[in-house]
Amino acid sequence: MQEEIIIRDCHSFAKPEEVVITHSDINIVVDFNHSIIKGKVTHTINNITGSEMFFLDCKDIIIEKITTGVEEKKTTFVLATPQPFKGSALEININKDIDIVTIYYQTTPQSAALQWLKPAQTAGGKYPFLFTQSEAILARTWVPCQDSPGIRFTYDAKVKVPIGLMALMSANNSVQKTDDGNYSFSMNQPIPSYLLALAVGDLVYHPIGKRTGVYAEPSEIEKSAYEFADMEKMLIAAEELYGAYRWEQFDVIVLPPSFPFGGMENPRLTFATPTILAGDRSLVSLVAHELAHSWSGNIVTNATWNDFWLNEGFTVYFERRIMEKLEGKSYNDMLTVLGLHEMVQTINQLGIDNADTCLKLALNDRDPDDGMTLVAYEKGFFLLLLIEKTVGRERWDRFIQDYFNRFAFKSMNTEFFLQYIESSLFNNDKSQLEKINLNKWIYGTGIPENIPQVVSERFVNIDKCVKELAGGKKAIEIDTNNWTTHEWLYFLRKLPIDIPLEIMKELDDAFHFTQSGNAEILCAWFQIAIKNKYKNVFLALDNFLMRVGRRKFLVPLYNALLNSEDLKQYAKDIYAKARQNYHYVSTNTLDERLL
């Protein structure tokens, strides 16, 4: 069976079967005054077919000149007509014997990967901040590259930033600021472009363990270090499950609130939202998720974004195994039941016959970001859980570890994976394969009937409490001692759709939801409050929408507001004020409904 997968990616102009990048040298200056990055990137290439044309992806970048060879002989190029969401093909004329191409360029303020923050938008309020978000196809907006998850390269970088700021990348990082603002980086393991990352700001470092630590703004560092105190334990647990960690260091940087995701698994430096700083370490399963990506996604990578479930399904499964190892089976069961509820809600919203509810996506004429729903995460997880329950955990674990080792630093697509698992795990046993029905799970819409059933014993008590409330018991009389965030979320989701205002106030007075410092609980509570027009939350909701840019929270909250005829204008007004604080990834999703 062929094990090197080279697939032409519909979201990239690159032709890696002809010419492929093997290493990149990036040399850039970060200019906060003009909100641009300026410099050059030198690509070392393998001209497989002796081609005289080298194709790169490029969007909202100004190309100044391009040279070839170590002697930097100037060459000609064409920046093709831009296409929606994909940008332009950068077509570079090369000699078939050339193996080095250097592009001098600068970004523009429209470069979507780059989030430029003013001092007032940071925790400290004194210094500006920059962070990148390259997934899915935004690396091309800050570095001309072959922007496909199926193409891997190593890189070195030199970055110049204003004195007093620290630069960090998805590479080896300094733990202290330099005196002159110059930083050097190396990433010796090959990565795809979506894992290329840069952050610049007033940052400090706090070590957690021998291989783990956290970066944050000075005002956030102590609570960040407290929240992530178990990172080293997580890393050890992950290695015990599926083999050695291959990236030397696992650090987390806590970004300003406008970061659009919960986390981003950039190698050696996970980007994390401050919304996981709940103060009680209750949301650290997100860190386990990003750590799990160090195997599923970063080591074995989806070949195209149509195969996104291979990254995320495995990662959710691995994340929950890590949390089970650290916190016990009952914890895993809670995460699994909540994940099922969220998946059902997502699929119902999309429509059970919607093609986006398939695991194998068909995003050829769409922005791949459109397909990054919970379906890939949770439906992918439940398929892998079904396989575990069919073949047994011990056999399944051996398969996963072998899978990560055999395909390390390679790409995987759905079709190849199916061939591999049918022969390597199932030995083409038709009875087991029919029992699972892989094709229905992967190519079928909706939720298959043979989805594994999981019961959370800890949630059984929550069901009892909700029934007691419905029977007239006062909220203050419910024993909520030692409830985790997950139990609170389950409780909120089990409440009736329509709740009288006096009961809303009783719940709020008893449990102080509106004053919660936990973003997950706040988001769930706000949705209930919006539906029931509980006006006591609106000052807190204003502050939340102005401050938090995480798309997971913004989308359901704005949708809830827009679904209320009385609150549509409020939604548009607050969005007009808050939009400047959000990353492109979030505004790209929200603009259509709110502008």
Image (cartoon, rainbow, N blue to C red):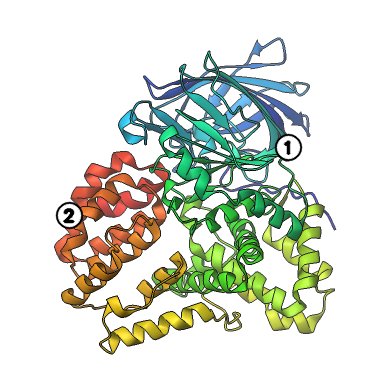
| Tag 1: amino acid | Gln
Left or right: 449, with 471 as reference point: right
Q: Could you say whether the residue bearing mark 1 is in a helix, strand or loop?
A: strand
Q: Where is residue 13 in the image (x, y as percent from the top left)?
A: 59, 39
Instruction: Determine if residue 412 is in view.
Output: no
Q: Could you say whether the residue bearing mark 2 is in a helix, strand or loop?
A: helix
Residue identifier under label 1? 189
Left or right: 96, with 226 as reference point: right
Q: How many labels does the image show?
A: 2
Which numbered disc, 1 or 2, marks the residue that appears first in the sequence?
Answer: 1
Q: In this view, does 83 lie above or below 478?
A: above
Q: Position of residue 116 (x, y in %)?
A: 39, 31
Q: Which residue in the rendered view is the most extreme toward the left? A: 566
- Residue at 49% in and 19% down: 161
Residue identifier under label 2? 570
| In the foreground, 528 or 383 | 528
Q: Position of residue 159 (x, y in %)?
A: 56, 21
Figure quadrant of residue 385: bottom right
| In the foreground, 30 or 337 | 337
Whether label 1 touches label 2, CB < 8 Å = no
Figure quadrant of residue 112: top left
Q: Is residue 185 above or below residue 533?
A: above
